[in-house]
């Protein structure tokens, strides 16, 4: 007797399972609401109701016909509900938790690509300046250059700064994982620079970091030294690992800053 009524006293696992199943069905109903799939789902529910009634009343012919329908109905449902299933999977992939996780991975990839590009350019003694947009938009500076709108990659950055190429003199501006412009003109710092050996690229990097919260990477053509300007300060002598760590650390600091 106790075994037969044991389901009336569920443990925490049963309650958790019920909540998960209820949440899944709720999300499915939200996705189907207002679509033709909802109408077809109601039609299928009616067929299931007729099937159970036919079993109870002993209508063997009707029951057999419905069983054949259900047997091949699963394959038919995959074809009929294909658009709705595709939409449901797409919305599942757009969940905030998943999106935040993959955005983190994408940001890490971008920083690594930029750091690799800086190392490659320094090894080739090719000057470069790369500005990474943060909270303050760099649209006005991007307008002074050539629109690109390409995914950030080390080979692309190295190609842009190839000597005598049309856009190698200006700055590249990066927004998220996109390289939005090249050959952009940046403002020079208005403060005196203690090291007179710093050229125009370093002064432009300091100038932009003073006016905005951008991170600006500079590769020196003369010394092959990699520097990072942030908040009006210049950190010099970076390698691939230290530059990647600095970019990720500054990106995290920007995300923690209240708006």
Image: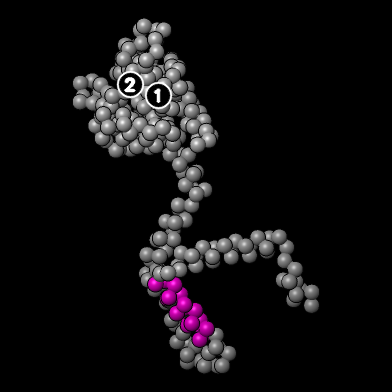
Q: In front: 87, or 119?
A: 87
- The magenta span reads 36-51
The residue at the point 44 percent across, 34 percent down is 135
The relative height of residue 230 versus residue 45 in the rendered view (above or below) is above
Q: In front: 210, or 233?
A: 210
The residue at the point 51 percent across, 92 percent down is 60
Spatial CA distance of label 2 from label 1 is 9 Å
What residue did someone put label 2 on? 187
Question: Dot 2 lies on which element?
Answer: loop
**54 lies left or right of 194:** right
What residue did someone put label 1 on? 211
> In the picture, which quadrant includes the N terminus?
bottom right
The residue at the point 31 percent across, 35 percent down is 180
The relative height of residue 189 versus residue 25 in the rendered view (above or below) is above
Is residue 158 visible in the rendered image? The answer is no
Q: Give the prevailing secondary structure in the magenta stretch.
A: helix
Residue 242 within the segment the image draws in magenta: no
């Amino acid at each position: 007797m106790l075994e037969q009524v044991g389901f009336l006293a569920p443990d925490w696992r049963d309650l958790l399972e019920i909540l998960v199943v209820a949440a899944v069905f709720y999300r499915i109903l939200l996705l189907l609401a207002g679509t033709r799939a909802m109408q077809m789902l109601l039609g299928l529910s009616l067929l299931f109701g007729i099937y159970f009634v036919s079993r109870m009343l002993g209508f063997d012919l009707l029951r057999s016909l419905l069983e054949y329908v259900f047997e091949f109905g699963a394959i038919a449902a995959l074809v009929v509900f294909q658009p709705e299933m595709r939409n449901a999977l797409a919305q599942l992939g757009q969940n905030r938790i998943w999106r935040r996780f993959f955005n983190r991975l994408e940001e890490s990839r971008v920083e690594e690509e930029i750091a690799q590009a800086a190392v490659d350019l320094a090894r080739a003694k090719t000057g470069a300046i790369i500005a990474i947009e943060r909270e303050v938009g760099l649209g006005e500076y991007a307008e002074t250059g050539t629109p690109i709108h390409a995914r950030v990659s080390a080979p692309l950055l190295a190609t842009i700064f190839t000597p005598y190429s049309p856009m190698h003199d200006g700055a590249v501006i990066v927004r998220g994982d996109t390289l939005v412009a090249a050959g952009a003109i940046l403002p020079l710092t208005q403060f005196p620079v203690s090291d007179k050996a710093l050229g125009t690229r370093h002064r432009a990097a300091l100038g932009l970091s003073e006016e905005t919260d951008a991170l600006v990477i500079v590769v020196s053509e003369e010394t092959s030294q990699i520097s990072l300007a942030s908040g009006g300060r210049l950190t010099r002598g970076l390698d691939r690992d230290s530059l990647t760590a600095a970019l990720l650390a500054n990106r995290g600091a920007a995300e923690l800053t209240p708006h």
